[in-house]
Amino acid sequence: MREKVERYLNEVRPSLQADGGDVQLVDVTEDGIVKVRLTGACGGCPMSQMTLSQGIERHLKKSIPELKRVVAV
């Protein structure tokens, strides 16, 4: 499952980088929790929670239905 998550993150990464940010995969747990770290401009952005839940999490869950949630660490 980690490889699938990495593949998806590589697809969304250019959009984040265009705004000065990025996302790093920290861990994918056996129970379907994806842990990511938002960096650069995304790390301190007031909209980062929306980016995480409405962008990254929504699309990851659509592509990988067995995922439960995505959390920032």
Image (spheres, grey):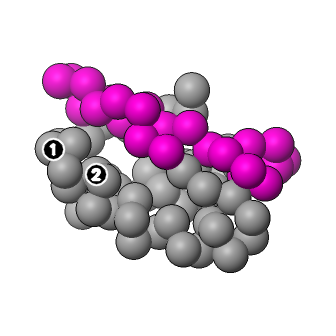
Placement of 2 over or under 56, stated as above or below? above
Query: Which structural element holds mark 2?
Result: helix
The spot of residue 57 in percent (x, y) is 44, 51
The magenta segment is 24-47
Q: Which mark is residue 10?
A: none
Any part of residue 47 in sight: no
C-alpha separation, residue under disc 1 versus residue under disc 2: 6 Å
Q: Which residue is mark 1?
A: 1
Q: Is residue 65 left or right of residue 24?
A: left
Callout 1 environment at 10 Å: few (<14), some (14 to 19), or many (20+)?
A: some
Looking at the rendered image, the quarter that the N terminus falls into is top left
Q: Residue at x 74, y 70 (%)?
A: 19
Residue 25 among those drawn in magenta: yes
Placement of 11 over or under 32, stated as above or below? below
Residue 43 among those drawn in magenta: yes
Callout 2 environment at 10 Å: few (<14), some (14 to 19), or many (20+)?
A: some
Any part of residue 57 in sight: yes
Q: Which residue is mark 2?
A: 5
Q: Are marks 1 and 2 in contact (CB under 8 Å)?
A: yes
The spot of residue 4 in percent (x, y) is 20, 55
Inspect the image, locate mark 1, and give the three-letter code of the amino acid beneath it: Met
The spot of residue 46 in percent (x, y) is 84, 47
Query: Which structural element holds mark 1?
Result: loop
